Amino acid sequence: MEIYIAEEKVFYYPAQFTPEVARDRVEQKKTGLVAGAVGALISRPKPDEIQFSAAEYRYEPYWMVNITSRTRFERNRTFTFPVSGSEVQSVILMGQVFPLDPRQREPAVTLDGVEQCLEENHASRSCDALEGKTIDLSRCQNFQRLVVEDLENFVPRGWLVTPPRLKASAVVRQVMSQVLKPAQNAHLILEEKVEVSLLELLFLPVYAFEFEWSAKNKRSVVEFDALSGDLRSSGRKLQEQVKGMLSRDLIFDVTADAVGLIVPGGSIAVKLVKAAVDSGKK
């Protein structure tokens, strides 16, 4: 089996809103966001009872993967077709004489043949690279993205960069399991090819604002999507930047051994062909 992996790419999306605009929008809705729908109805906190305590601007990682499998194979097949009447003794096809099949109740001819088959399967997935939850990233199509040339040193000024917990091999295995299906009744495999046509790591901007509701001894984080402007309550807790984790070799860890774990039939040799990711790799 041959597995081709397209060039591994990393992009980031610049924020479309300033921190000041984001903070202002959150302040206008903080009562409902922090107290919640039920709390707002029962306790009805005043805006000045909920105080801003901290902020964090971070880039969060996401994966986008597209995979296509292609299997060309042959399988034996017996073809049976009826003839025009009981008076038929044999049939000549392509210069060859075929007698009627005595095993058939009705007059018929049975031929042994080979079906030449081609199966193609496609699967794609976009998910967050922290917990692996499937995410619709179609909203990003309307925004400009920039290439991350040096992943190891990718630290935009004033921002924290969250390293992915989910490595490329894990996502590729998940998607590949959807496209790798055994060829039914195949007696000869002519070609097995898998193409990872898209393998991208995306960093999306998020403003996180922490508020304290002292009367309830409650702290909440409200996240502001710096691309779309959407607000999310119950956001992630503010965290310090994790250093030393943005290594391209560690994150893009797809190897023949890694993908071979989910290939049907453990004895099949996997040939992995990876595109060059920089000018130094040909």
Image (cartoon, rainbow, N blue to C red):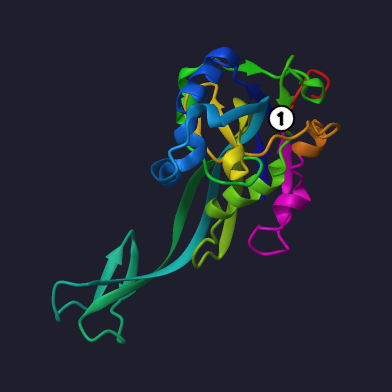
- Asked whether residue 18 appears in the rendered view, the answer is no
Instruction: Tell which of 221 and 261 is nearer to you.
Output: 221
Compared across the picture, whether 43 is left or right of 68 comes to left
Residue at the spot x=73%, y=16% of the render?
Answer: 158
Residue at the spot x=56%, y=19% of the render?
Answer: 23
**Residue 30 position in % (x across, y down):** 50, 30
Amino acid type, label 1: Ala
Is residue 219 highlighted in magenta?
Answer: no
Query: Which residue matches tag 1?
Result: 275
Q: Which residues are magenta?
A: 253-274
SS state under label 1: loop
Is residue 273 highlighted in magenta?
Answer: yes
**Residue 121 position in % (x across, y down):** 48, 48
- Asked whether residue 20 appears in the rendered view, the answer is yes
How many marks can you see? 1
**Residue 50 position in % (x across, y down):** 56, 31
Instruction: Tell which of 82 and 72 is nearer to you.
Output: 72
Check the image and report above or below for 63 versus 282. Answer: below
Quarter residue 281 falls in:
top right
Check the image and report above or below for 149 versus 182. Answer: above
Q: Hey, which residue is sitting farthest right in the picture?
A: 244
The C terminus - image quarter: top right
Quarter residue 59 falls in:
top right
Classify mark 1: residues with Cα within 10 Å, few (<14), some (14-19) or many (20+): few
Residue at the spot x=31%, y=87% of the render?
Answer: 103
Residue at the spot x=47%, y=36% of the render?
Answer: 45
Instruction: Tell which of 228 and 83 is nearer to you.
Output: 228
**Residue 231 position in % (x across, y down):** 49, 30
